[in-house]
Amino acid sequence: MTRIWRITLLTMAAVGTFRASALAQPETDGKTAEEKKPQTATARRAELEENFRRMLSGSVLKGTWQMVQGEEGKPLTGRPLSEPRPEEYAISKVSKAGEDYWVIVARIKYVDKNVNIPVTVQVKWAGDTPIITLDSMSLPGLGTYSARVMVYRDFYAGTWFGNCYGGILSGQIVKPEVAPTAGGDDAEKRPAPTTQPADD
């Protein structure tokens, strides 16, 4: 009996040693220990913000907008939207200005207006999706507007409001091939906006 117990105990010890050795073996999936660490919330936000900046900088937003004309002090609900009209915003530069604030340098072309202005916007995040936000912001030469515009995977869509009118807008974010000017500044060749005003 003693011999049998010794063999049994030796077998159990060997199995335990094998299991411990197997658990101690490093994983061989090709990733370093640093790469396997979960991404922190701060690092993830920095990555999302950099993707946002790169997606919009040097791009042109091409799409359409529609509007509803209202009356002072009355809601726009139930009023018919106008036919879609073309819009084009050429964005030359996007830079972060604060915690949630960004400056978008854009040329805004709509109806008979064509202006190049810096617009300070607030960017709020819905998970991994940025929402460009304006609240009663005065845009030189255009008027005062509020807006919520979502940008995601090279498309944009949202709503905008002026005084007694408002509407919707949507389109594509494209990266045109633009040769730099002799002075090296191609900002004038790239118009760009963030919100869409309506007819005066």
Image: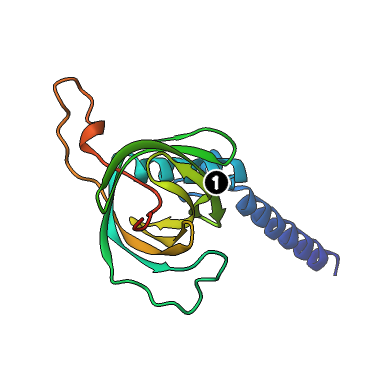
The quadrant where residue 104 appears: top left
Q: Nearer the viewer, residue 162 or 88?
A: 162
Q: Nearer the viewer, residue 161 or 118?
A: 161
Answer left or right for 71 relative to 155: right
Answer left or right for 116 relative to 126: left
Q: Is residue 64 above or below residue 26?
A: below
Residue positioned most to the front: 72
Q: Where is residue 7 drawn, in percent x and y?
A: 75, 63
Q: Is residue 190 above or below residue 79?
A: above
Residue at screen point 33% across, 71% down: 82
Q: Where is residue 52 drawn, in percent x and y?
A: 42, 45
The quadrant where residue 188 appears: top left
Colour approach in the figure: rainbow
Residue positioned most to the right: 2
Q: Where is residue 115 drawn, in percent x and y?
A: 30, 39
Q: Is residue 165 visible?
A: yes
Q: Is residue 4 above or below residue 102?
A: below
Residue at screen point 41% across, 67% down: 69
Residue at screen point 29% across, 44% down: 59
Q: Nearer the viewer, residue 71 or 20?
A: 71
Q: Is residue 93 visible?
A: no
Q: Is residue 180 above or below residue 44?
A: above
Q: Quadrant of the C terminus?
A: bottom left
Answer left or right for 177 relative to 40: left
Residue positioned most to the top: 183
Q: Where is residue 90 drawn, in percent x and y?
A: 28, 44
Q: Quadrant of the N terminus?
A: bottom right
Q: How many discs mark residues in the rendered view?
A: 1
Residue at screen point 26% across, 54% down: 111
- Residue that mark 1 sits on: 36
Q: Secondary structure at mark 1?
A: helix
Amino acid beneath label 1: Lys
